[in-house]
Amino acid sequence: MSESVPSISSAEVGLASGILGAGVGYVLAPRRYNLEQLLTQTPDVFEKSILKNKIPAHEEAPKKAYQQIMEARQSYMDAVSKNTGEAKLIELTRATSLESAYKNIKRFIPKAKAESAVIVGALASALAMVINYIASSRD
């Protein structure tokens, strides 16, 4: 009596791992970047965090808010170079004007959850497919 074990292809393992990884990435990711994260991000990450071209040209409040956050970022970067970054960050995050600027621009910040889910899912899928391929080729 011979029983055969069904084989699972690398694509099936990759798909299942990708779905699981996307779920994990979605759950563990922050909802949106908060004000402190926006102020401390590197310039390239900030450019992806707030897509300037998504801000409508006819809306003045978001444009002013974006400019205000850019000025606060520059102020923070200057403070970091003088080793007073922590104090400046506390000062900036407590400023009511900056908090209202953040509220005006918040809707233009893409949700970090979707990005994280895609990235973690793709990585999990690729890694699982490679591991399954290597394991099955040794048999």
Image (tube, helix red, strand yellow):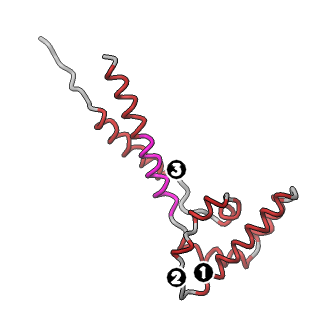
**Quarter holding the C terminus?**
top left
Residue at the spot of label 3: 28
Residue drawn at 54 percent across, 88 percent down: 58
Q: Residues within 10 Å of mark 1 (few under 14, many from 20)?
A: many
Residue drawn at 14 percent across, 13 percent down: 2
Measured as percent of width and height from the top left, residue 52 is found at 57, 73
Measured as percent of width and height from the top left, residue 75 is found at 79, 68
- SS for tag 3? helix
Q: Earlier in the sequence, mark 2 or mark 1?
A: 2
Check disc 2 and give the amino acid type. Pro
- Is label 2 or label 1 in front? 2
93 vs 52, nearest the viewer: 52
**Magenta part of the chain:** 111-124
Residue at the spot of label 1: 62
User: Splitting the image into 4 quarters, where does residue 81 fall?
Assistant: bottom right
Residue drawn at 54 percent across, 73 percent down: 108
**Answer yes or no: do the residues labelled 2 and 1 have beta carbons within 8 Å?**
yes
Measured as percent of width and height from the top left, residue 111 is found at 50, 63
Measured as percent of width and height from the top left, residue 53 is found at 53, 74
Check disc 3 and give the amino acid type. Leu
Q: Of all residues shown, which one is farthest toward the top? A: 1
